[in-house]
Image (cartoon, rainbow, N blue to C red):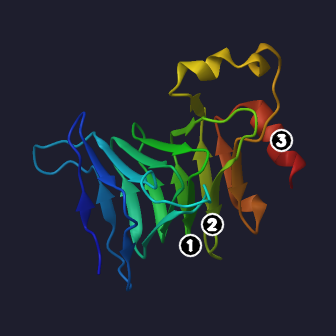
Amino acid sequence: GKFSKLGAKESQSILFYDPVVVEGISAENLEINKTDGGTSYTGSIIFSGRYIPSTQEIMKHVSKFSQPITLSAGSLVLEKGAHLEAKSLTQTAGSKVILDQTSSIETKENLDIKELWLRLEDFTNPTATKISTAGNAHTVTVQGPLGIFADHETFYANQSLAHNVDQELLKLVDKDITKITLVDVPEDVRKNMDSHR
């Protein structure tokens, strides 16, 4: 099976509270929010484990696509333990990939992220968002700057924020770290990455 397109109009969302599993082999792209005729799609496609009862916070909602995914516009959102696997992921400039601290992405081939936003919920004992590749022939490109935000105003009242903070919020994982390229990502992030080589 395969998906050929998913499109959410402006200020609208398509939510997947149950995991989506697409089996088989397909070279055809899953196009997310691609303009169709005169209709543009700039809404959100959301994968969420919000209603899946589980004691674990990570990988409780695993969606698998055996085909390449292209995010053309709008937002691809993973939250509440959602994990997305795909053959590859290509993001077009102007769209957003939004991940919370319990979500993750894994591709078998190329991973090209142009605008990444991280949603913080737990600052005292944070879990780092994970983006990884598992294949052999691939490249990983993350273009910055990275956006970081919190939905709850109480987050900003945290006393820890009164001082400089050094916490791992994002893990970029690859068996060959030289394949990871950071473009326009702040220098502090690059220094941290170099220390993990």
Give the label on residue 133, or none. Answer: 2
Give the label on residue 192, or none. Answer: 3
Name the amino acid, label 1.
Answer: Lys
At 77% across and 32% down in the image, what residue appears? 187
Sequence order check: which comes first, mark 1 or mark 3?
A: 1
Mark 1 nearby-residue class (10 Å; few <14, some 14–19, many ≥20): many
Q: Are marks 2 and 1 in contact (CB under 8 Å)?
A: yes
Quarter in which the C terminus is drawn: bottom right
Q: Tell me which corner region of the image, top left, top right, bottom left or bottom right, holds residue 104.
A: bottom right
Name the amino acid, label 2.
Answer: Thr
Quarter in which the N terminus is drawn: bottom left
Left or right position of 189 against 151: right
Q: Are marks 1 and 3 in contact (CB under 8 Å)?
A: no
Name the amino acid, label 3.
Answer: Asn
**SS at badge 3:** helix
Q: Is residue 97 above or below residue 88?
A: above
Residue designated by label 1: 108
Q: How many marks?
A: 3
Which residue is outermost to the right? 195
Q: Along the line of sight, which residue is nearer the eye, 54 or 185?
A: 54
**SS at badge 1:** loop
Q: How far across and how far down the image is residue 154, in percent?
A: 59, 20
Q: Is residue 111 above or below residue 3?
A: above
Q: Along the line of sight, which residue is nearer the eye, 6 or 40?
A: 6
